[in-house]
Amino acid sequence: MAAGKTEGRHDQAKGLDERQPLDALKLLADGQKAAAAVIDGALADIADAARLAADALLAGGRLVYVGAGSSGLMAMADALELPGTYGIPRDRIVILLAGGAASLEDLAGGYEDDRALAVGDAETAGIDAKDCVIAVSASGSTPYVLAIEAYAKGQGARVVAMANNPGAALFEGADVSILLQTPPEVISGSTRMGAGTAQKIAFNMFSTLVGILLGHVHDGHMVNLKADNIKLKGRACRIVSDISGVGLDEAERLLARSEGSVKEAVLLAAGVADAGAAKAALIQSGQSLRRALKALG
């Protein structure tokens, strides 16, 4: 079986185990920087992927994150952040990690080769034509991920594929392909390092742009956050205060009137009569706080 770029040998890794700790860390740090640098070449594809994902959510579909091993953990981390950061309902986010919960205790490799497991997971998830599937594999050839991609395409779902090898099989069935062509790992084949770093950055940017496209970001603020602890309630107050210009005490009162909705609290500060009218204004604006504020004149 031919090895992909992710299995290549790093040209400076020879004798790594004999280096002084700081020298070894310098080489590892350089590897991380080189991985991060590949993102610039993928920006247009990340933008296209975010548009597909946002459109799916707007049409009532779901985002289905699919992965195995280290790549699956990167996908899962992104998926788990979306409800709290951007208020996307939990039931609109699906995570298919090869091995499921068992992989969170023992990231065993065998699950990623199990195509039957993959099809069963996809069927249980009920992937359909309204969904957008985000499939990630460093090699781009992981059987579990490829099987779910094929199933999803068969159901008419849109597919975003992310891989670190050019010409990856995962790209063949994708609507949008995100190539993160990272150089060989300092520790050969350890794709939780350079490849994982590039994936994490790409996922961060992808989901942030999804939030922006859905109207959940305003001047750098996460205006659709789920404020479910003391820290986040304080952040919500500061966001309302910063956007509307009211004091923190007034921001807290407005958030109480809006049942914690930052967007509605800002609209109340701008003169909207009550929370019901604020909700209606947001529906009219497509959930864009900026458009809703402009409509007030």
Image: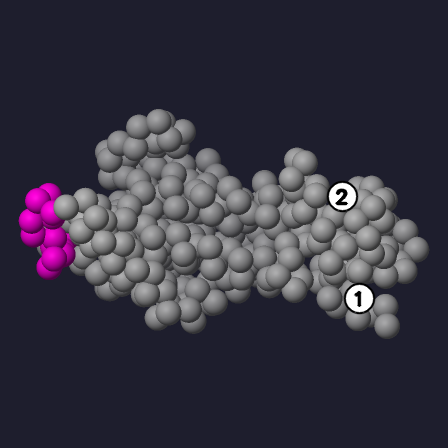
Residue 141 visible, this angle: no
**At x 53% / y 62%, what residue is drawn?**
209
- Left or right: residue 266 versus residue 33 is right
Q: Report helix, strand or loop for mark 2.
A: loop
Residues tagged 1 and 2 counted as in contact (Cβ below 8 A): no
Q: In x, y percent, where is residue 235?
A: 67, 47
Magenta-drawn stretch contains 131: no
Q: Is residue 146 above or below residue 283?
A: above
* Amino acid type at image mark 1: Leu
Magenta stretch: dominant SS?
A: loop
Magenta-drawn stretch contains 15: yes
Q: Decide which of tag 1 and tag 2 comes sooner along the chain.
A: 2
117 or 192, nearer to the observer = 192
**At x 73% / y 58%, what residue is drawn?**
242
> Within 10 Å of the Cα at label 2, are there few (<14), some (14-19), or many (20+) other Cα atoms?
many
* Residue topped by disc 1: 293
Residue 259 visible, this angle: yes
Q: Quadrant of the C terminus?
A: bottom right
- Left or right: residue 104 versus residue 205 is left
Q: Report helix, strand or loop for mark 1.
A: helix
**At x 34% / y 53%, what residue is drawn?**
197
**At x 24% / y 39%, what residue is drawn?**
113
* Amino acid type at image mark 2: Gly
Extent of the magenta region? 7-19
Q: Is residue 193 above or below residue 91?
A: below
135 or 61, nearer to the observer = 135
83 or 89, nearer to the observer = 83
User: In the picture, residue 267 is in which quadrant?
Assistant: bottom right
Q: In x, y percent, where is residue 28?
A: 23, 52
Q: Which mark is residue 201?
A: none
* Residue topped by disc 2: 260
- Left or right: residue 190 versus residue 75 is left
